[in-house]
Amino acid sequence: MREAPEGAGGRPRAAVVRDALGVGVAVGLSGFAFGVTAAGAGMSVLQACVLSLLVFTGASQFALVGALAAGGNPFTAAAGAFFLGTRNAFYGLRLSQLLALPKAVRPFAAHWVIDETTAVSLAQPDRRSARLGFTVTGLTLYLLWNLTTLLGALGAEAIGDTAAWGLDAAGPAVFLALLAPMLKSTTERAVAGLALVLGLGFLPVLPAGVPVLIAALAAPAVLWLKGSRSPQDSRRSPKGGRP
């Protein structure tokens, strides 16, 4: 598919900036929950801030500190976070064609290839608007995410035991709040449901962090089942059919 010429049928800059800022601010504020969760998992303020600066992908960060907080092996926790982050590589393949950024800029832009910047970019009708949406979303989210991580970690350090205040549940709650609106199709809901069953089912019997890796098998399992049922459904369907 050919990209629309730059500027042809594009949205007003103000509308693109407004939408990008809305996404960036809304999600960026959840960095506070990550800072609290990281501190509750035993990380120092510096460690939490460096993780947000260098990793900058919320789902992977929450998965990592969640596994560590449960007493999981650091390597297992890192593996779970890595697998969650691999989706950004697939986003990058699409965005590289859509944005067509100069080669000198691509290594820096790659750090901002996450769920939110991808969603805002793909929602735009032309390349100029996509670039603007990507930049505003990425910049706003990066600054706010790191600032609120710092504030969350400092706040958790000041109040002491985060579990006593119930703040250890802040990370999972935010993660679920971000995930729920994305589950629009039956397949997506089936994957989420099976992942939940696998994760909770193996949680009592396996080391912390390992159930997350097993839950990741829900996606290929559901897709395989869906693919295997499609030929059977097509054979059962009568030829022709009513108009």
Image (tube, rainbow, N blue to C red):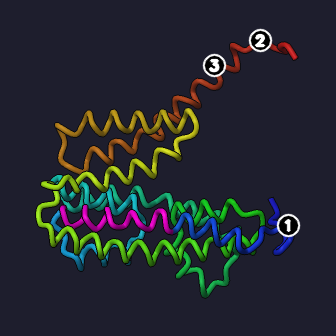
Residue 233 shown left or right of residue 146 in the figure: right
Image location (x, y in percent) of residue 52: 36, 73
Residue 76 shown left or right of residue 86 in the figure: left
Q: Quadrant of the C terminus?
A: top right
Which residue position holds label 1?
A: 9
Image location (x, y in percent) of residue 228: 57, 27
Q: Quadrant of residue 153?
A: bottom left
Which residue position holds label 3?
A: 232
Identify the amino acid type marked 3. Gln
- The residue shown at (65%, 63%) is 94
Q: Quadrant of residue 122?
A: bottom right
- The residue shown at (82%, 74%) is 6
Disc with the residue nearer the chain's start (3 vs 2): 3
Q: Give the range drawn in magenta.
A: 25-40
The dominant secondary structure in magenta is helix
Which one is nearer the viewer's eye here, 137 or 26? 26
Residue 91 shown left or right of residue 236 in the figure: left
Magenta-colored stretch includes residue 234: no
Magenta-colored stretch includes residue 38: yes
Q: Is mark 1 on a helix, strand or loop?
A: loop
Give the crowd class for mark 2: few <14, some 14-19, many >=20 residues within 10 Å.
Answer: few
- The residue shown at (64%, 69%) is 18
Identify the amino acid type marked 1. Gly
Q: Quadrant of residue 57?
A: bottom left
